[in-house]
Image (cartoon, rainbow, N blue to C red):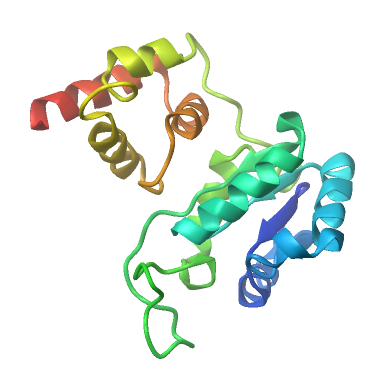
Amino acid sequence: MYKIKETVIVEGIYDKIKLSRFLDAVIIVTNGFGVFRDRRILDSIKKMADETGIVILTDSDSAGFRIRAYIKQSVPKSKVKHAYIPETHGKEKRKSEAGKEGLIGVEGIKDEIILDALRKAGCVIDGSAAAPKEGRAITKTDLYKAGMSGGERSLEKRRMMAASLGIPMKISANMLLDILNRLVTYEEFCEIVQNINERI
C-alpha cells in the first residue's frame, strides 16, 4: 500500500474500490456529475482541500474534464493538484460495451500508470514528493512561440505534445503549461517542439 498525503478525488465508486486496493488515502467520489447537484460533496472536497490538499484524478473523457474544471474553480489553486491518465481506448472489464468516447476510465487503468500520474502531479507518496523540474520555467509566451496557443494549428500541436507526454489530448493551453513545468525542463520542451515541427 502506498500512503498518499492528499485526498484523492475520483468520479465513481468503482474508481474508489480500485484505488483502495493499493493506496492508503482518503478518497472522495463525485458520483459523476452528482458533484454539481449535491452541495455536500463539494463541501467535503473543500474541507479536505484545506486539511490535506486534494488531487483530482478523473477520467480522460469530456465528462472527466467537466468535473475537473468545476472542482478546480471551487478550490484555491494552491490546494489542488491534477493527475492525468492517458487516453486509452477500450472498455472496463465489468462493462458490456465501451463508453461514449471509447476511453478506459480510472478503474480500468493499470495501478502503475495511476501511481505514476500521482507522482507527476506532485503528490506526497510515502512521505516524499517528486521535486519540480529545475531551471527556467516554461511560459505562456513559450507556448505561443511554439505554436501551441493562439495559432492556426495550435490544437493539433498541443495534442501531439500531449501524446508525447502520455497525457489526455483534450488539454487546454493553461493545463498543458502546468503539466509541462512539472514533467520536463525548458530544454526538453524545446526538443519535443522541434520533433513536432519536423513531423508537421
Q: Is residue 197 above or below residue 170?
A: above
For residue 116, side relative to residue 158 (left or right): right
Q: Residue at x 76, y 39 (%)?
A: 75
From the viewer's side, name the closer residue of 158 and 150. 150
Dividing the picture into quadrants, the one containing residue 72 is top right
Residue 121 in picture, x, y percent from top left: 58, 40
Q: Nearer the viewer, residue 69 or 136?
A: 69
Q: How many marks?
A: 0
Left or right: where 168 falls relative to 192:
right
> Residue 82 in the image: x percent, y percent?
60, 43
- Residue at image x 41%, y 75%? 99
Q: Report the residue at 49% width, 33% height from top.
A: 179
The x and y percentages for residue 81 are 65, 40
Q: Is residue 187 visible?
A: no
Location of the N terminus by quadrant is bottom right
**Where is residue 197 drawn, in percent x and y?**
15, 24
Relative placement, left or right, of 50 versus 160 is right
Q: Name the outermost residue toward the front.
A: 37
